[in-house]
Image: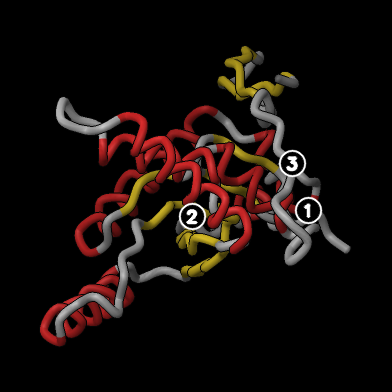
Amino acid sequence: MKQPITFVRGNLVFGAGGADDAWALYRLTTRSYAGLTSARKRDLLGEIAGFAYTIAADFQILRVSRATSVEAYTDMAYGLAAGPESESALLDRMVSAQRARVSLLASATPEVFLAVALRAEPARNLRSSVSRALGLQDPRALTARAMAKLTHEESKVHARVADFLDCERATTGDLQWLVRRAFCRGLGEPECDPRWLPQALVPGQRRRGRRLAIRAA
C-alpha cells in the first residue's frame, strides 16, 4: 500500500504522486437545504454547477460528520441568550437541561471539505523524466521556485472556488482530524493532538539554486 499523503504545507496536500499529485484543501460552509425556498434551492444548484464547470480541474467533495460538542453548544446558547435582561438562574437551568439532552442524543454535525487538484507542469524533457524516476519529484525536494508556483496556483484556485462557494482554507488541524477519523469512523471522535504540526519548511542553500530543506517540527 502506497503512502496516501507524503507531505503537507498549509492547505496544500501532496499525495503518493509527490509533486505531480498536489491538492488544495478547503472547508465549505454548510447550510440547511430543507430550510431554503424553492428559488434559493435552484440558485444553490446553479452555484454548484457553475463551480464544477469553471474550476476546470479534478476535485473531490468530502462530506463527513463530526460529533456535536456539548461545550460548543453551551457556549452558543449562552452567547445567543446573554443580555442585560436575561435571568441567569433560569438560563442556567435551561442550558443544563439542554446539555444533558444533547449528550444523550449523540448527535453529529455535517461538515464538507473540498479538495482541488493543482495543475502541475508536464514533463517536457529528459531531465524531468529522470528526476521523477530518481524520486526528485518528492515534494520534500521541491525548489523554492517550484513551491512558489504551486502556492500561486492555489491562490487562483481559491479565488475561483470563492466565486461560487463560501469557503476557507483548511488548517492542519482539519487535516489531522480527517486522517485520524478514517481509522475510527463510526466508533467515536478521534483524539487529536492540538500541538501537532506537519514537517516544517525552512529555507536551505545549495550550491546551485535554492531549495527547501526539511526540518521536523
Q: Which quadrant of the figure has residue 124?
A: bottom right
Callout 1 amino acid: Ala
Residue hosting label 3: 191
Callout 2 amino acid: Glu
Q: Quadrant of the N terminus?
A: bottom right
Which sits in the foreground, 56 or 104?
A: 104
Q: Which residue occupies 73% across, 56% down?
A: 188
SS for callout 2? loop
Q: Are marks 1 and 2 in contact (CB under 8 Å)?
A: no
Callout 3 amino acid: Glu
Which sits in the foreground, 97 or 182?
A: 97
Q: Is residue 71 visible?
A: yes
Dot 3 surroundings within 10 Å: few (below 14), some, or many (20 or more)? few
Q: Quadrant of the C terminus?
A: top right
Which sits in the foreground, 13 or 37?
A: 37
Residue hosting label 2: 121
Mark 3 or mark 1, which is nearer the start of the sequence? 1
Q: How far apart are marks 1 and 2 (CA)?
A: 16 Å
Q: In this view, does 102 lie to the left or right of 163?
A: right
Q: Which numbered tag is attached to residue 167?
A: none
Q: Distance between the residues labelled 1 and 3?
A: 38 Å
Residue 137 position in % (x across, y down): 68, 46
- Which of discs 1 and 3 lies nearer the camera? The answer is 3
Q: Which residue occupies 61% across, 23% down?
A: 201
Which sits in the foreground, 152 or 42?
A: 42
Residue 40 lies, with reference to residue 183, above or below; the image says below
Q: Is residue 150 visible?
A: no
Q: Which numbered tag is attached to residue 133?
A: 1
Mark 2 or mark 1, which is nearer the start of the sequence? 2
Residue 92 position in % (x across, y down): 41, 35
Residue 127 position in % (x across, y down): 65, 48
